[in-house]
Amino acid sequence: GILNATGESPKCFQPSFGRGNRSEDCLYLSVYRPKNGMTKMPVLLRVHGGAFQAGEMGPRENADFLMDEDVVLVQIQYRLNGFGFMSLGEKVMPGNFGIKDQVMALK
């Protein structure tokens, strides 16, 4: 199938700091490159802050200032709060899924 990637993806569940589309289906990354970027360029990975409790990829406008540079910007989303970092201290639910999401995005 074809994914229309021109709109914003759902955000991961977190404390409600404003409105927005929240979903468990939130593991997305956004890739921005200059319009005329046909050669190999360095990649800048942006991982949002928020103390593993809140945060999200910024709107597309956050990438605009880099589009005049020879760099590719990759922004990722990862599971937050209990969905990403809760652990029962057992092998069944070891926790740190949010960190594993970040590692998978790097791959």
Image: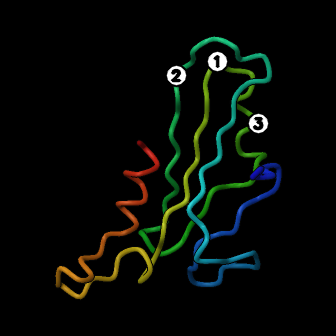
**Lateral position of residue 16 relative to residue 90, left or right:** right
**Lateral position of residue 4 relative to residue 31, left or right:** right
Q: Position of residue 89 (x, y in %)?
A: 17, 84
Q: Residue placed at 75% from the left, 52% from the top? A: 1
Q: What amino acid is found at the position of numbered circle 1 in the picture?
A: Asp
**Lateral position of residue 66 relative to residue 61, left or right:** left
Q: Kindly identify which residue carries mark 1.
A: 70
Q: Residue placed at 23% from the left, 88% from the top? A: 88
Q: Earlier in the sequence, mark 3 or mark 2?
A: 2
**Lateral position of residue 105 relative to residue 76, left or right:** left
Secondary element at tag 2:
loop
Q: Earlier in the sequence, mark 1 or mark 3?
A: 3
Mark 2, Cα crowd under 10 Å, few <14 / some 14-19 / many 20+, is few
Mark 1, Cα crowd under 10 Å, few <14 / some 14-19 / many 20+, is some
Q: Position of residue 69 (x, y in %)?
A: 68, 20
Using the numbered discs, state the Cα–Cα distance from disc 3 to disc 2 in whole angstroms: 16 Å
Q: Kindly identify which residue carries mark 2.
A: 42
Secondary element at tag 1:
loop
Q: What amino acid is found at the position of numbered circle 2 in the picture?
A: Pro
Q: What amino acid is found at the position of numbered circle 3 in the picture?
A: Asp
Seen from the viewer's position, the closer of residues 15 and 103 is: 103
Q: Position of residue 37 (x, y in %)?
A: 71, 17
Q: Residue placed at 57% from the left, 14% from the top? A: 40
